[in-house]
Image (cartoon, coloured by chain):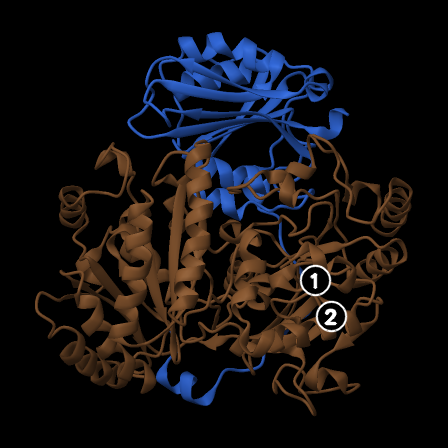
Chain colours: A blue, B brown
């Protein structure tokens, strides 16, 4: 807080010139070239993935509604498509929605999941037809969202093929993951096209 | 998904515009892909088919010269443009255009903070600067200036201001705190308003009005130009800040609370944009409905009672703050306490009383100029939640508050929705914000929500209340209620539109204002 004196006398002039906003620095990684660099965003600070997917260099960062909203929407920002081959996010529906609207056009969200919304055991997957079909097993086998994330991270997808397909919605009856509605997202860099 | 071209535009003209736009801003910043790029410009919370507001393309210039080039190209080809800053107010349609086929002019790449003037307490920003961006910047330079963020804080400062948005500090009336504007007109000319029209002006952001008619207001909630830069007065950090919350037990207490708040606001005893918040607004930012009630229809009293107990809130919850040196705050708090806590059952709380309370914490931050996203959690109240905000203006009287509350609550409950509302008390009015939350995957519910919204507009207008802002779907309808003397105001606006934008390319349909060539599309 200012002192009473400062408040009454005003502050010294400070003028800053045109300022380009800094990128959000926390997400820039140094992925190994022999592995697929994949980014996982989730609420849990230390996600307990069921397994470490082979061939994947995993970078994890916490995701909250605040962080999702703070992510720069600029192409050259923190979620630069140059740094990762895929992005998986887990969170509340509001946080995942916020993240999705911040990703910009260089990421392509190829899968959106809504889990336990209509009913506790109901999982809705919205994805290109081939992916929506192949995820049926992953949803069915997953005990929780981190199980599901492990499966998403392990996918070695052909973006060019996926981007050609129409997206469809599939409903799956499976285990209940949480007592609240949850959401998930898988995005791939649009540079593949 | 098929591309929807603007009315009266053929494929050849569209392609001609796209080629010029690509030349102006670069191919990377002209978005055409219907499947993967343009959905980012849809109305995500649409209650009607998204195609009604589907753009044909989006163009994202990086600077004002590129804006000029795009506007000129649009004029040559007759392409309607829909300017957005950050496009984050999803309650009112987000980034989507009013007119299907319009090209979104996405200004969020223009995200420079051009000036922060500590001495005179103002900032100059481009359209892409969000409240969060500005807050971080002020922190990073050690500024002693506060911003006045909207809730949630990811919105653009310029976009919120020109859309007549409001905040929660003493600078809560955003348009009042605007000073100086740069506008690209429909012919591509750049204009500086008011004092800024004087070459070398030293007072562009210090005196609002210049000489002659004050034109800045014409570029707010309008389609007369593209605002590319704006001056915003910022609040010097006061020597002290004490936020407080008062809970009230009965629904009918709204009458007395409002009566008592009016003189406190008029006399600046409560200097900030204070808020009277209904309990479900409080609940929705931190709970999921199904933990209290799984049935359809409005929440039953038993569930409401449990929510109040769990969250230690009242049926109504008043948030305000005092600012300044300690003796002034103490004096004002004594007056406030005498007035507002003498209503039977009222309880006053301060920061120490509500540690760990999510609802308190985000209000405490907002009234101190710290942007946050907490309020956006309302979208978790029901799974797949979306919302539209119904926003009538009310006098600050108990009678009007109760009348508006009943008018909305009764219709909302009959339609099977919860009343989730707050009343934001300004200088002489209250912005009554009702968040109509619905399930985005329930088509019948969305239809009901849309119908209800229209009924609320009619019912409010019949009682003499008009809305200050609205969703794309209802711009024409609400503009149609402002029809005194054979809609003289509307006709004046149309004459202005025709004079300032004879090609009719800027924001067709914004707040019910259509260019002549498309006027039949509207009201």
Picture layout, residue A172 above or below residue B108:
above
How busy is the neighbourhood of tag 1: few (under 14 within 10 Å), some, or many (20 plus)? many
Disc 2 on helix, strand or loop?
A: helix
Picture layout, residue B352 above or below residue A1:
above
Residue at the far left in the pictured view: B344
* Occupied quadrant, residue A192: top right
Q: Is the residue at mark 2 from the same chain as the one at mark 1?
A: yes
Front in this rendered view, residue A23 or B196? B196
Residue B274 disc label: none
Residue at 46%, 53% (x, y): give it.
Answer: B454
Which residue is labeled 1 in the image? B514
* Occupied quadrant, residue B237: bottom left
Residue at 41%, 57% (x, y): give it.
Answer: B456
Q: What is the total number of numbered labels drawn onto the structure image?
A: 2
- Can residue A10 be seen here? yes
Report the quarter where the C terminus of chain B lies.
bottom right
Which residue is labeled 2 in the image? B497
Front in this rendered view, residue B464 or B100? B464
How busy is the neighbourhood of tag 2: few (under 14 within 10 Å), some, or many (20 plus)? many
Could you say where residue B159 lies in the image, as x and y percent from the top left?
A: 59, 62
Could you say where residue B196 lies in the image, as x and y percent from the top left?
A: 72, 82
Residue at 22%, 67% (x, y): give it.
Answer: B254
Front in this rendered view, residue B494 or B272? B494
Disc 1 on helix, strand or loop?
A: loop
Could you say where residue A32 lies in the image, as x and y percent from the top left?
A: 64, 22
Q: Are marks 2 and 1 in contact (CB under 8 Å)?
A: yes
- Can residue B373 be seen here? no
Chain of the residue displaying label 1: B
* Left or right: B67, with B492 as reference point: right
Could you say where residue B212 lies in the image, as x and y percent from the top left?
A: 70, 91
């Amino acid at each position: 807080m200012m002192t009473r004196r400062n408040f009454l006398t005003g502050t010294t002039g400070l003028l800053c010139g045109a300022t380009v906003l800094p990128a959000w620095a926390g997400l820039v990684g140094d992925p190994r070239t022999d592995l697929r660099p994949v980014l996982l965003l989730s609420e849990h600070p230390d996600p307990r993935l069921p397994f470490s997917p082979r061939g994947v260099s995993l970078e994890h960062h916490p995701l909250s509604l605040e962080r999702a909203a703070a992510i720069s929407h600029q192409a050259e920002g923190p979620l630069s498509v140059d740094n990762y081959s895929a992005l998986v996010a887990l969170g509340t529906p509001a946080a995942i929605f916020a993240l999705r609207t911040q990703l910009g056009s260089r990421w392509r969200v190829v899968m959106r999941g809504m889990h336990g919304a209509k009913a506790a055991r109901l999982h809705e997957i919205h994805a290109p037809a081939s992916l929506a079909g192949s995820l049926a097993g992953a949803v069915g086998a997953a005990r929780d969202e981190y199980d599901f994330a492990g499966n998403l991270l392990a996918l070695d997808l052909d973006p060019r093929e996926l981007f050609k397909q129409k997206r469809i919605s599939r409903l799956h009856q499976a285990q209940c993951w949480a007592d609240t509605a949850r959401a998930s997202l898988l995005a791939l860099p649009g540079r593949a096209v | 998904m098929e591309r929807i071209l603007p009315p009266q535009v053929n494929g050849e003209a569209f392609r001609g515009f796209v080629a010029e736009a690509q030349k102006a801003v670069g191919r990377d910043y002209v978005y055409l892909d219907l499947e993967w790029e343009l959905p980012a410009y849809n109305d995500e919370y649409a209650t009607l088919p998204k195609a009604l507001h589907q753009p044909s393309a989006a163009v994202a210039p990086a600077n004002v010269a590129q804006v000029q080039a795009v506007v000129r190209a649009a004029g040559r080809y007759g392409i309607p443009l829909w300017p957005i800053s950050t496009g984050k107010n999803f309650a009112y349609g987000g980034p989507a255009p009013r007119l299907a086929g319009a090209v979104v002019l996405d200004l969020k790449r223009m995200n420079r903070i051009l000036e922060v003037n500590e001495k005179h307490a103002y900032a100059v920003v481009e359209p892409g600067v969000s409240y969060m961006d500005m807050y971080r910047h002020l922190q990073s330079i050690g500024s002693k200036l506060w911003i006045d963020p909207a809730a949630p804080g990811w919105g653009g400062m310029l976009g919120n201001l020109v859309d007549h948005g409001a905040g929660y500090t003493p600078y809560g009336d955003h348009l009042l705190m605007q000073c100086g504007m740069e506008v690209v007109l429909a012919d591509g000319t750049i204009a500086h308003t008011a004092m800024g029209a004087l070459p070398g002006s030293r007072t562009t952001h210090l005196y609002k009005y210049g000489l002659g008619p004050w034109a800045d207001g014409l570029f707010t909630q309008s389609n007369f130009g593209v605002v590319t830069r704006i001056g915003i007065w910022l609040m010097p950090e006061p020597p002290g800040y004490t936020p407080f919350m008062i809970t009230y037990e009965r629904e009918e207490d709204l009458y007395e609370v409002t009566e008592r708040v009016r003189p406190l606001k008029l006399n600046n005893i409560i200097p900030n944009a204070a808020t009277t918040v209904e309990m479900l607004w409080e609940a929705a930012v931190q709970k999921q409905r199904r933990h209290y009630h799984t049935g359809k229809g409005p929440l039953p009293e038993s569930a409401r009672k449990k929510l109040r107990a769990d969250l230690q809130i009242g049926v109504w919850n008043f948030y305000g703050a005092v600012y300044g040196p300690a003796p002034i705050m103490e004096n004002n708090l004594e007056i406030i306490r005498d007035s507002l806590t003498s209503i039977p059952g009222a309880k006053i709380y301060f920061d120490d009383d509500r540690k760990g309370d999510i609802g308190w914490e985000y209000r405490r931050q907002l009234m101190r100029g710290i942007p946050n996203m907490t309020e956006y959690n309302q979208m978790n109240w029901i799974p797949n939640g979306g919302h539209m905000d119904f926003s009538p203006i009310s006098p600050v009287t108990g009678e009007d508050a109760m009348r508006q509350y009943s008018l909305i609550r009764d219709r909302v409950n009959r339609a099977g929705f919860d009343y989730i509302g707050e009343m934001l008390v300004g200088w002489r009015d209250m912005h009554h914000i009702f968040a109509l939350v619905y399930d985005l995957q329930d088509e019948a519910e969305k239809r009901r929500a849309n119908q209800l919204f229209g009924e609320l507009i009619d019912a409010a207008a019949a009682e003499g209340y008009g809305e200050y802002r609205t969703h794309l779907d209802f711009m024409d309808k609400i503009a149609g209620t402002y029809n005194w003397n054979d809609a003289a105001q509307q006709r004046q606006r149309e004459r202005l539109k025709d004079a300032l934008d004879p090609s009719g390319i800027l924001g067709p349909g914004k707040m019910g204002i259509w260019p002549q060539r498309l006027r039949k599309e509207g009201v």
